[in-house]
Amino acid sequence: MELSPSLHRIGSDLVNVYLVADDTGVTVVDAGLPGQWDELEQELASMGRTMADVRAVVLTHGDTDHIGFAERIRGEHGVPILVHELDAPRARGEVKKEMKWGRVKVGPLMKFLWYSGIRGGLSITPVADVGTFVDGQVLDLPGSPVVVHIPGHTPGSVAFHVPSVDAVFVGDAMTTGHVLTGAAGPQLAPFTLDPEQALASMTLLEGLGASWVLPGHGAPWEGGIAEAVRLIREAA
């Protein structure tokens, strides 16, 4: 799915993966589920690109539904996988997340479990080797993503601000489509370890000025990051 000529997405609002392209290649933001591999190849082809053009996969955090095909693309194509240093053990499978479910509706939950299950979400291979980055770092990758450390969902949760495509990739710092309740619009994501810290981290996002807010789950939001943060605070 093309959001703009240099910004593409795979997924169906339930589990999203993004691609940022420029003359130097492609940066993949998050690695979704293992079964999204074919979608990745197809989307690259629609952009006139191949796996050889992928310079790195950057992870917004180390949860399993964000590292799905990471080890495969690393092992088969030598693509580096990068994650915040605090979530590196999580991406390597050394730390298991204590799940905090909160409110659940059966319909949305079953839809999410079905979507994930048929795409290999119940058997995720950890990443054997990851590189790391820190807050404020400008990554030497297509799009020049700027790392914004926004702890709360996990200790090493980050957003990537990419001014060249007017977007901020927020991972699970927020969602626009709650996979457990079906609620739409900007809100804190489920399975957040520290909701109070996650809410406080919104301060680090609201001044970025990006129009596109691109979550790991939910539809792309083009209402601007400041408005998304306002709605989250209002709901809280």
Image: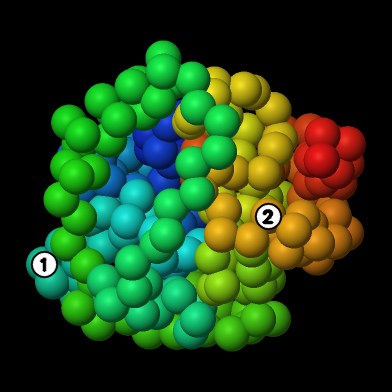
Residue at 33%, 22% in the rendered image = 110
Left or right: 115 in relation to 208: left
Q: Quadrant of the N terminus?
A: top left
Position above or below: 82 against 66: below
Of 7 and 124, the residue lying toward us = 124
Residue 24 is tagged as none
Locate residue 206, reporting x and y percent.
Answer: 85, 55
Color style of the picture: rainbow
| Category of crowding for the residue at label 2, using alpha-carbon neighbours closer than 10 angstroms: few (below 14), some (14–19), many (at least 20) | some
Provide the residue designation for mark 2: 195
Inter-mark Cα distance, 2 to 1 = 37 Å
Residue at 35%, 50% in the rendered image = 65
Left or right: 47 in relation to 230: left
As drawn, the residue found furthest toward the left would be: 76
Locate residue 199, reporting x and y percent.
Answer: 77, 55
Position above or below: 13 against 81: above
> In this orientation, does residue 89 appear?
yes
Left or right: 81 in relation to 218: left
The secondary element bearing badge 2 is classed as helix
What type is the residue that disc 2 sits on? Pro
Left or right: 202 in relation to 62: right
Of 54 and 81, the residue lying toward us = 81
Locate residue 193, reporting x and y percent.
Answer: 56, 59
Of 97 and 213, the residue lying toward us = 97
Provide the residue designation for mark 1: 76
What type is the residue that disc 1 sits on? Glu
| Category of crowding for the residue at label 1, using alpha-carbon neighbours closer than 10 angstroms: few (below 14), some (14–19), many (at least 20) | few
Residue at 59%, 85% in the rendered image = 134
The secondary element bearing badge 1 is classed as helix
> In this orientation, does residue 1 appear?
no
Locate residue 30, reporting x and y percent.
Answer: 41, 56
